[in-house]
Amino acid sequence: PTIRRTEFMPLPWTVLRVDLHFSLHPEATVVTSRLACVRNRAVDAGALVLDGDELETLALTIDGCDPQPGTVRRSASRIELDIDGDEAELEIVTRINPRANSTLSGLYQSRGGYFTQCEAEGFRRITWFPDRPDVMARFTVTVEGERASCPVLLSNGNLVEEGELPDGRHYARWEDPFPKPCYLFALVAADLVVLERRELTASGREVLLQVWVEAGNLDRAGHAMDALVHAMRWDEETFGLELDLDRYMIVAVSDFNMGAMENKGLNIFNTKYVLAKPDTATDADYEHIESVVAHEYFHNWTGNRVTCRDWFQLTLKEGLTVFRDQQFSADMLAAAAGAEAAASARAVKRIDDVRVLRAAQFPEDAGPMAHPIRPDSYQEINNFYTATVYEKGAEVIRMLHTLLGPEGFRNGMDLYFSYHDGSAVTCDDFVEAMSEANGRDLDQFMLWYSQAGTPRVKAEGVWDGAAGSYLLTVSQYTPPTPGQAEKQALVIPLAIGLIGPDGEDRPLQLEGEAHPGGTTRVLELSSESRQWRFVGLDAEPVPSLLRGFSAPVILEVEEDDARLAFRMAHDADACNRWDAAQRYAERVLLALAAAAADGRAMAVPQGFVDAFARLLRDQRLDAAFRAQALSLPAEAYLLERMQPADPAALRAAQIHLGMTLGSMLADDLRALVEGLVEPAEYRYHPADAGRRALINLALRYLCAARDARGVALAAQRFAEAGNMTDRFGALAALVHGAVAEAEGALAAFYRRYRDDALVLDKWFALQAGMWRRDPAAPPTLARVRALLADAAFSLANPNKVYALLGSFFRANPAEFHLPDGSGYALWAEQVIALDAANPQVAARMARALENWRRFTPALQAAMRPQLERVRDAEGLSADVGEIIDKALAD
Ligand code: ARG
Ligand code: ZN
């Protein structure tokens, strides 16, 4: 069934207080729930409605009595109760089976412990409840379990009581002082150890911070703890938001569908986003942990104190919280880098964000799942935890920040909290607060919430040498998306600069202005097309548009190779300098791919090699930036730009370009690897991480070119590495180059880390992403099939599935999209197998084929029968069903 945003109705009844009692047992946990319910005065009349999913109901009473005959309507997923009066106390007893719960939604077991995941609709798998975010209740929770297997019993809020029980059991009672929707409920009962720290909040309250992990992992919890403290300080300083609880807990669990969950006072995290030590985690892991810890912490205000009225508003909390975590990470990087390198460090973070948006969100916006950041309908809400809701949602918040300025944005946030603290609201409420605080009409801006699709912005400049003026014409156009044929003009902040022939930015003075104002300015395009005339220029400028990626759009501007090379060398905006390199590389790669597809010879333009070499040699640029600028665009993004998408041709182009750059620049690359000195002791620091990233990239090009001395360098660095970033970087270079040393290194890596689940995920992912450089070599598919049978692999563990199947389906297009369709057969078989156990994970894998219509006719013909095979599979979940239906719809 399709749920529509416009059909929202407030409930006739709500819940004020919840008293839960869990008697934990692996196969038969008994949950007793006492609900203090009241009528909603705003609604005339109606039944009290409860949601349930796979519950065995043992008892249900209203005010201590069985319901009157004829007042109850029941189905497997819903109970409706007709109740006289305005108040009622319900007592409901259910029995659930955590061990059999392979969906990892609701209460489930992982490695002998009990964990919950309730967002979006998992609470109904625990007990009957009005499972909607606008029902906010005060929770008291008693957890009772076996002391030996579950010495630690946690839930939200404050621990108010604990004690012993007969038969080796014990209990703990928790009280959460803040009303919350049930999606923020959490329970953990497991054998864990804790890293603790006490901190003072800005107002001087002492808070207890805890990171709970399995025994043996305490030495990997410190980074997450540091991140938590940094996030606390940042939110105090940036937004005046303080931790409101006495105790804040983070728990790491190995089996988890997503990254992490912001349950009030008891965040539950995928181990991947908690555990780090230099020997097992890369710089990228350290960075992700810091940002996910911060993300969940920031939700305490943007998500928990103010939550969503309904799930269509998801971006209200997710877009805003991603924006906050992006700003936090940028500030952290800038502070660590020091004053001189701060701007570059920020740009590197921004580039990372843009890469993710382009590789994940642009394709989504151009396919059958395209939806506005606030969707209008869904079949399964879990399918809408998307790059659009999260990443494009964050871009929309960033545009508000750009348009209103940091102070205006902060004022809007303050007003938002002053109005809505403690309630469940909509995206309109947020934008209205921003509007009121700044005295600015944002009605047209709201189109960003309702229109799907990536807008195209076209820009053209005309130079008038006699007048010294430059006329810039900018227009916008958003292509149609499913269900939205017509689009209106959006408000697009366009940050621009004009670069003089000497490479220096010119002051920007618009016609009619008395003085120039700065070298980067934000123009606002709010109609279909508009012109701006810049005056007082001494020579024809080169425009640098969309600086800092000021809007989530595709910029279409005519630039020849020389101009791209010029901007690669001179653009003062680091983000645009990187983008110029990306555009140039894209142009070269797509031309090579076209040649490969036609069977013509591939030739790399010398101009590109030269521009690339200049960046590589520019010692004034910091290493992290150079690593970004010299990394080629993501394959997923390039396929999106190819018409039709031809993964084999693109792969041939990438191999050819990598070999060319690696061999032509081998001397520089080797010198760079040998010349960048690293400190002996690993520390997670942007300067060190930048050097490591640049070295690993250089090794990659050298191995791609089969440069003998380069390969030897990679093998040596693999053997002697003192941390995971170096070890895995060298291994990846060897594997990427498919050099003879690769297999031995993979085996050595496996032996060293055979008992370390998170490190093995890297090992699986790396092999799933292997390129075939020798057409006679066996396809990567054969290796993936073999790895599915590896003792360390398990289809029941989402991290393993994402590492092996996710990497193969998404990160290795040429090997997945084999002309004989064997990749698609594997896809269908695995999606169907996964779906029987865990629909959310299955749906994520299913999405790998949603853009099937973008591929060559021959590949489409091979994909269709496999899509139909999944569609017709018996007992298909709503999750996968929605994805396949939308993919196959015409
Ligand atoms: N709110 C969580 C976060 O962004 C994600 C929860 C996703 N849950 C789901 N069932 N899709 O931090
Ligand atoms: Zn979130």
Image (cartoon, rainbow, N blue to C red):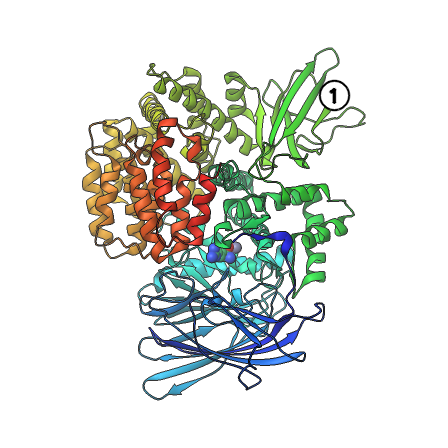
Q: Residue furthest bottom?
A: 166
Up-down relation of residue 690 to residue 604 (above or below): below
Could you tell me how many numbered marks the image carries? 1
Residue 837 appears at what percent x and percent y? 34, 58
* Residue at numbered disc 1: 535
Q: Could you say which quadrant of the image residue 90 lies in?
A: bottom right
Query: Which residue is located at x 65 percent, y 16 percent?
Result: 540
In the rendered structure, the answer to whether residue 550 lies left or right of residue 717 reads right
> Which residue is more in the foreground, 683 or 406?
406
Nearer to me, 507 or 115: 115
Query: Whole-percent x and y of residue 115?
Result: 40, 67
Disc 1 marks a residue whose amino acid type is: Val
Q: Is residue 778 above or below residue 788?
A: above
Other-residue count near label 1 (Cα within 10 Å), few / some / many at <14 / 14–19 / ≥20: many
Q: Nearer the viewer, residue 383 or 632?
A: 383
Q: Is residue 187 above or below residue 273?
A: below
Q: Is residue 416 visible?
A: yes
Asked where in the image residue 64 lies, by quadrant, the reply is bottom right
Q: Is residue 634 visible?
A: no
Tell me residue 327's x, y (percent): 57, 48
Where is residue 302 drawn, in percent x and y? Answer: 60, 58
Relative side of 183 to 493, left or right: left
> Which is nearer the eye, 676 or 723?
723
